[in-house]
């Protein structure tokens, strides 16, 4: 956030020197370390920057391109006819050629542009250049591993922003190592026992840890909330796509590596622990709320190493916005961390539910714009979006009806998808509801949300198509943190790709990275260490080489805020007067309104880098997988199997399930046609099998096939459990409770308990309705119905029932007349005793 303007020295360009860190799975790659620019400038004045940019009118992604991704460059030229281009390899040999397309005026930059598309070339290598009309681009690589280094470095940024821990030279490089900041060791006055501002509270809190927010050393719940959500969501989406191994244990440079927990979750937990500490303790006024922020009582001098900060730290008044950020991120934590640390997940869920209750009791405690001494105000006059986001996360995690009601009654639930940022978080909730499997919403709602997200992505593509630089940002949107807006909009494109498998969305996301890495009006890579002309003087208290030569430049992977037509700092006003919107940026440590770093900005870059780094080579023909491979179906009832693919298909695959031989009493009741996309291939879809009621005492069987074009066929068997003989008994009990009922509908909760001495691994519960009840939606289980017969299968995460353990799920249904409670239940085909 903006500080008092410090004394400045004349800036100069220096080569970005990156330290190679020999850590398995986490070291910098060769593509991250481009050849340093030998060109120097005496001043970072606007005219000088423009002159430098004009030296390279062929604008490319200075890092490079993926072999299977889009490959376009922008050429600054007023020529009205196409220009010839040649792609040359490192030895200068021509490997491809073509002609540009005249794009014309690019309004955001004020430049006349052509587009050169060399996407047909799929070779790999380093040191390529694109030559157009005798002008060569910066060198770049074409490699499938292009973004591996950026994925690692953009996340290592968070380790280096940690408060309350010594930064280790072995993990960050010797230039970046320093003692722990703000652990109550003089001259620090925080963060182990921090008082409130006068009149806010009469006690102190230990709020150590977390991430320093930006170029300052404050810690803010609202910005920490969205940053944490993006980091954890990156892992959650990678787990759905099958790419989570790249973010797993021992993949990043963090001190917790090797503990069995994915490193990205270790990093996010550092901030989550801080957010939990910011909750008002029980027994205190406004218990359950979250303090809005904590920082120095005056702006920290620039430069200042964190362990040398002498200012008093203060807690600022709790706010509804901060409380809902805590509720949302803690609910997400409970869902994602449960497989790795159940106690921490339970602690997160408890904090989330207490925060929700406190926010409902205090719905309009707003942070004020005037609270901006020593730190950013992060004011927010409308918290309806935070209520929607928090309710969405709690619903996705718990399935409870009160959170579903809060979601569906929110005005944001029906609104089009809008851009997201720390003050506008509704779309984070939409993404969760549209992508988390088994969310407790009617199917029509989920379909509508997914359609809204893809519509938003289509809008971004239409904006990109009309520009010379293909950036998902309109010409009037170059504001403070514009690069974050680019990355956030690219995230929506990535989500649309995950939902549909349509390549145009992946192309848009990757071309957004092209813009951020050099294909832009200034020929500037906004990510330190990535590109020949990369930012290296971002506004920061410690990475402040421009102000103090003994201090380092920002580390590789640090993301500059980007062009800001508002020119909201003295340096920008002095050097950028009259700039075109997309050129209102200067790489100067004093320009905090164009050149600061921030955790929420780097979080969106890290999400995008992880998305781009996923290997997407043409897959082998995937195999259909069915579990279980043998299933028992009660006579007159039904049972379910789960169907998925073994690997991602190249395009959508339709799988047909049908009986191929055996007892005709056994048939497919629901799920005979399944569609798998490159995004959802790993998610099991349910097929319901039924066994007709008959008079014989024969337990017939049948063989079923599941296959289709583009997938290897699987077979499985089904056996009828004839009811003319006494069915086996299972050690279980079932509680069926109608929670709410109205005219022609009701909701119910069903709890199945293992009363036996052995663990149940995977459960399928069956019962039959005596009336005309029809289930319309369910949560925390996959529920199908054929006639009156109902089959409920575990959701995966709740599939294990230890002795004495239980699992609950809920559903919504319609009925007319009576609504009798089922009297008999089966567990995995056996009657509950």
Image: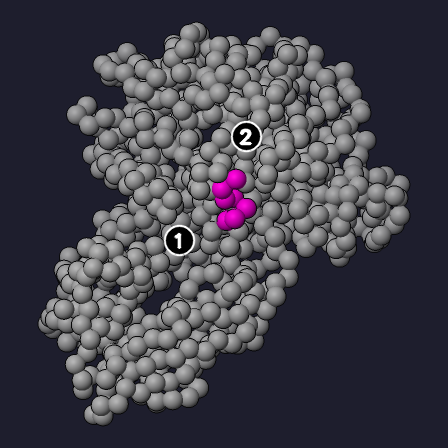
Tell me, yes or no, whether the highlighted magenta stretch contains residue 454.
no
Residue segment shown in magenta: 244-250
Q: Residue at x 66, y 27 (%)?
A: 19
Q: Residue at x 59, y 38 (%)?
A: 24
Disc sitting over residue 436 in the figure: 1
Q: Position of residue 299 (x, y in %)?
A: 46, 12
Front tag of 2 and 1: 2
Label 2 CA crowd tier, 10 Å (few <14, some 14–19, many 20+): many
Question: In the picture shown, does residue 656 fall above or below 433?
Answer: below
Q: Position of residue 214 (x, y in %)?
A: 50, 24
Q: Residue at x 46, y 10 (%)?
A: 309
Mark closer to the chain start, 2 or 1: 2
Nearer to me, 50 or 672: 672
Q: Is residue 348 left or right of residue 752?
A: right
Q: Position of residue 470 (x, y in %)?
A: 65, 45
Disc sitting over residue 172 in the figure: none
Q: Position of residue 584 (x, y in %)?
A: 64, 27
Tell me, yes or no, whether the highlighted magenta stretch contains residue 248.
yes
Tell me the residue that label 2 is attached to: 157
Label 1 CA crowd tier, 10 Å (few <14, some 14–19, many 20+): some
Question: In the picture shown, does residue 705 fall above or below 151?
Answer: below
Q: Residue furthest bottom?
A: 696
Residue 525 falls in which quadrant of the image?
top right
The answer to whether residue 87 is visible is yes
Q: CA distance from mark 2 to mark 1?
A: 28 Å
The answer to whether residue 810 is visible is no
Count of marks placed on residues: 2
Question: In the picture shown, does residue 174 fall above or below 700?
Answer: above
Of helix, strand and loop, which one carries label 2?
A: helix
């Amino acid at each position: 956030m903006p500080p008092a303007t410090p004394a400045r020295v004349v800036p100069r360009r220096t080569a970005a020197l990156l330290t190679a860190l020999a850590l398995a799975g986490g070291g910098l790659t060769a593509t991250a370390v481009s050849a340093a620019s030998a060109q120097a400038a005496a001043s970072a004045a606007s005219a000088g920057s423009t002159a430098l940019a004009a030296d390279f009118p062929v604008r490319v992604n200075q890092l490079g391109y993926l072999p299977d991704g889009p490959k376009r460059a922008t050429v600054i030229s007023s020529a009205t006819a196409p220009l010839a281009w040649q792609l040359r390899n490192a030895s200068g040999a021509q490997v491809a050629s073509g002609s540009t397309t005249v794009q014309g005026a690019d309004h955001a930059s004020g430049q006349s542009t052509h587009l050169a598309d060399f996407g047909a070339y799929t070779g790999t290598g380093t040191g390529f250049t694109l030559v157009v009309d005798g002008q060569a681009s910066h060198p770049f690589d074409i490699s499938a591993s292009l973004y591996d280094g950026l994925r690692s470095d953009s996340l290592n940024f968070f380790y280096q922003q940690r408060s309350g821990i010594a930064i280790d030279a072995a993990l960050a490089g010797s230039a970046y190592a320093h003692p722990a900041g703000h652990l109550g060791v003089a001259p620090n006055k925080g963060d182990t026992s921090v008082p409130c501002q006068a009149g806010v509270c009469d006690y102190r809190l230990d709020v150590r840890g977390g991430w320093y927010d930006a170029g300052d050393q404050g810690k803010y719940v609202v910005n920490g909330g969205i940053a944490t959500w993006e980091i954890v969501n990156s892992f959650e989406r990678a787990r759905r796509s099958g790419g989570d191994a790249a973010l797993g244990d021992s993949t990043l440079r963090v001190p917790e590596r090797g503990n069995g927990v994915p490193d990205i979750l270790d990093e996010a937990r550092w901030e989550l622990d801080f957010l939990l500490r910011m909750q008002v303790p029980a027994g205190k006024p406004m218990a359950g709320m979250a303090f809005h922020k904590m920082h120095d009582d005056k702006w920290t001098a620039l430069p200042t190493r964190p362990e040398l900060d002498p200012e008093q730290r203060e807690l600022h008044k709790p706010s509804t916005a901060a409380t809902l950020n805590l509720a949302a991120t803690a609910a997400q934590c409970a869902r994602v961390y449960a497989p790795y640390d159940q106690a921490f997940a339970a602690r997160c869920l408890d904090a989330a539910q207490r925060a929700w209750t406190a926010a409902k009791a205090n719905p309009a405690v707003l942070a004020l714009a005037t609270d901006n001494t020593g730190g950013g105000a992060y004011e927010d006059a409308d918290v309806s979006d935070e209520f929607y986001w928090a309710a969405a996360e709690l619903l996705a995690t718990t399935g409870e009806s009160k959170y579903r009601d809060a979601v569906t009654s929110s005005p944001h639930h029906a609104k089009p998808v809008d851009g997201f940022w720390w003050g506008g978080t509704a779309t984070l909730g939409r993404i969760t509801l549209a992508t988390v499997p088994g969310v407790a919403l009617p199917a029509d709602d989920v379909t509508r949300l997914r359609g809204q997200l893809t519509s938003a992505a289509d809008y971004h593509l239409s904006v990109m198509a009309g520009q010379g630089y293909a950036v998902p940002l309109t010409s009037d949107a170059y504001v403070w943190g514009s690069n974050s807006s680019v990355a956030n909009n690219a995230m929506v494109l990535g989500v649309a790709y995950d939902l549909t498998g349509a390549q145009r969305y992946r192309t848009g996301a990757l071309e957004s990275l092209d813009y951020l890495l050099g294909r832009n009006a200034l020929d500037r890579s906004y990510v330190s260490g990535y590109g020949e002309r990369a930012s290296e003087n971002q506004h920061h208290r410690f990475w402040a080489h421009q102000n103090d030569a003994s201090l380092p430049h920002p580390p590789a992977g640090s993301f500059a805020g980007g062009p800001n037509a508002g020119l909201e700092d003295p340096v920008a006003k002095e050097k950028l007067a009259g700039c075109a919107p997309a050129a209102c940026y200067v790489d100067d440590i004093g320009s905090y309104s164009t050149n600061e770093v921030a955790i929420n900005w780097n979080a969106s870059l890290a999400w995008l880098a992880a998305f781009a780094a996923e290997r997407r080579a043409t897959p082998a023909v995937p195999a259909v997988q069915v579990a279980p491979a043998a299933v028992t179906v009660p006579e007159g009832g039904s049972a379910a199997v789960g169907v998925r693919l073994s690997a991602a298909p190249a395009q959508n695959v339709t799988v047909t399930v049908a009986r191929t031989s055996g007892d005709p009493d056994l048939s497919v009741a629901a799920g005979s046609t399944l569609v798998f996309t490159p995004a959802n291939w790993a998610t099991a879809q349910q097929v319901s099998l039924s066994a007709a009621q008959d008079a014989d005492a024969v337990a017939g069987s049948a063989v079923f096939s599941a296959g289709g074009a583009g997938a290897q066929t699987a077979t499985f068997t089904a056996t009828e459990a004839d009811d003319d003989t006494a069915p086996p008994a299972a050690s279980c009990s079932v509680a069926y409770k109608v929670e709410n009922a109205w005219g022609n509908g009701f909701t119910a909760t069903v709890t199945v308990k293992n009363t036996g001495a052995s663990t149940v691994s995977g459960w399928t519960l069956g019962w039959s309705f005596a009336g005309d009840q029809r289930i319309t939606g369910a949560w925390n289980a996959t529920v199908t119905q054929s006639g009156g017969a109902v089959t409920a299968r575990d959701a995966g995460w709740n599939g294990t029932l230890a002795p004495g353990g239980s699992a609950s799920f809920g559903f919504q249904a319609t009925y007319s007349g009576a609504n009798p409670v089922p009297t008999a239940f089966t567990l995995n085909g056996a009657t509950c005793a």
